[in-house]
Image (cartoon, rainbow, N blue to C red):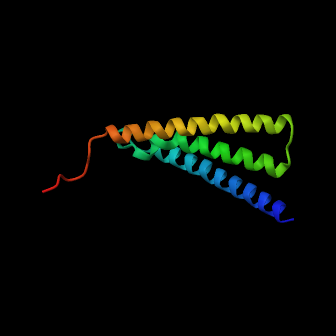
Amino acid sequence: MMTNMFSASSAWLGLAVGVALLLEVAVLFVRGRRRDEAKRLPRNRQLPMLLCMGVMLATSGAARLRGWTGTGMTVVFGVGMVAAAATVAFAIRSLAARASAPSRATPPV
């Protein structure tokens, strides 16, 4: 009983966070398109990472809530692994871009 409740609540949480991430990506994408290209938000570089995280969480949560097994769950697992690998790659790219950017901190006196 307790295991089923924990499993269902974690699936709902994953689905909710995944959908929230996908909505955030959509809103930031639309906002980024309205502005001038020179004034792009620095966060727009993180959109692919947020998109991959949203896909990974939303698909796995939805599949678990639907009770998928077998081939369907294998496909969802594969999509989740590809999205997780892409999330890590985009996070490393974002960290590398931030590390190579010129520092905005004031020099010590």
Q: Name the foreground residue: 1 vs 82.
A: 1
> Residue at image x 38%, y 38%?
97
Q: Name the foreground residue: 44 vs 71.
A: 71
| Quarter placement of the C terminus | bottom left
Q: Quadrant of residue 1?
A: bottom right
Q: Is residue 16 above or below residue 39?
A: below
Q: Position of residue 59 (x, y in %)?
A: 72, 44
Q: Position of residue 43 (x, y in %)?
A: 44, 46
Q: Is residue 51 above or below residue 23?
A: above
Q: Position of residue 58 (x, y in %)?
A: 70, 47
> Residue at image x 74%, y 38%?
77
Q: Position of residue 100 (x, y in %)?
A: 32, 37
> Residue at image x 65%, y 50%?
18
Going by the picture, which residue comes out furthest to the left? 109
Give left or right: position of 99 versus 11. left
Give left or right: position of 95 versus 56. left
Q: Quadrant of residue 103?
A: top left
Can the viewer see residue 41 in this picture? no
Q: Name the foreground residue: 18 vs 91.
A: 91
